[in-house]
Image (cartoon, rainbow, N blue to C red):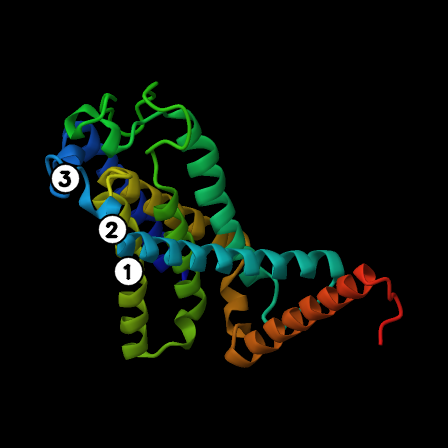
Amino acid sequence: MPDDRLYTRLTIALLSAMILVMAVSAAVPRLDIWVSAQFFEDGRGFPAAQSPTYEWLGNVLRWVFEATAAVAFVLMVVAALRGVRWQTGWRVWAFLFLTTAIGPGLIVNALFKAHFGRARPATILEFGGDKTFTPPFQIAGECARNCSFSSGEGALVAAVVIPVLVLAWPRLGGVARWAAGAAGVGLIIVTAGLRVIKGRHFLSDTLISILLSALVALLLYRLLRVGPERHRLTGAALRADLGWLGGGAVRLARAVFRRERGDPGGA
């Protein structure tokens, strides 16, 4: 996002995409059911939900994204509380962590999933359940907790992939940009798609979550003034900061181990 014109175009594009998804969902609410029906089989439900391979892949992807957000959180907090001046700067880590905290954490999980009460596809009448289908953004009482709207995994993958691409973009050449962009889009599609084919989310759940995280990232990019700091995120700086963090974790573990053994002085 090198200039205001590009930033403005991206903002308009994301807002337009969000409005389009909401409009289509309102005009053709049963489109969600039709898409989910492509992965449903009578007598078997959603076969992908019973697949160990899909379960393993989904867990691995979620752990990778959660671990990335956790590392960003630690680097941001250490910089704030201990005054450590990371070679990569603190803004890039605040950008990455806050995107995940606000998008998937606050908006999706604390607000949407906790209050809209939309039943998951596998639990509605059309797919052998006992719940009633409701469109997105319509408050319902079909689900008490951890509901379908909207997708936490969809929001999480976008909240990690998009900031990483934004931070790495200036250092990538033409071919590398295409490859990184394709890989990022692929990760988002696979992670969100797994939730749909397993009957855990409707298509609109995943699309809205992805767009929400993208909008949060766009807003934080400007608020945190990340643009001028991206040049600091080099391979050498990243290795140095992660090495310092790893060394600190080792020192802390040794101190705890010595304390448990009653040997405060160490060997």
Instruction: Identify the residue shown where x is 34% and y is 21%.
Output: 139
Q: Distance from label 3 to label 2 (Cα)?
A: 14 Å
In front: label 3 or label 2: 2
Q: Which residue is mark 1?
A: 185
Q: Is residue 85 visible?
A: no
Q: CA distance from mark 1 to mark 3?
A: 25 Å
Nearest the eye: 97 or 121: 121
Label 1 crowd (10 A; few <14 / some 14-19 / many >=20) = some
Q: Amino acid at mark 3?
A: Phe
Q: Which image quadrant: the C terminus?
A: bottom right
Q: Gap between marks 2 and 1, in whole Å?
A: 24 Å
Whether residue 246 is visible to the viewer of this picture, yes or no, is: yes
Quadrant where the N terminus sits is bottom left
| Cβ atoms under marks 3 and 2 closer than 8 Å | no
Residue at 49% of width from left, 43% of height from top? Answer: 102
- Direction top: furthest residue: 141
Residue in the picture at 53% in, 67% down: 228
Nearer the viewer's eye, disc 2 or disc 1?
2
Give me the disc on residue 40: 3
For residue 59, what is the image quadrant? bottom left
- Side of 50 relative to 210 (left or right): left
| Residue closer to the observer: 130 or 220 | 130
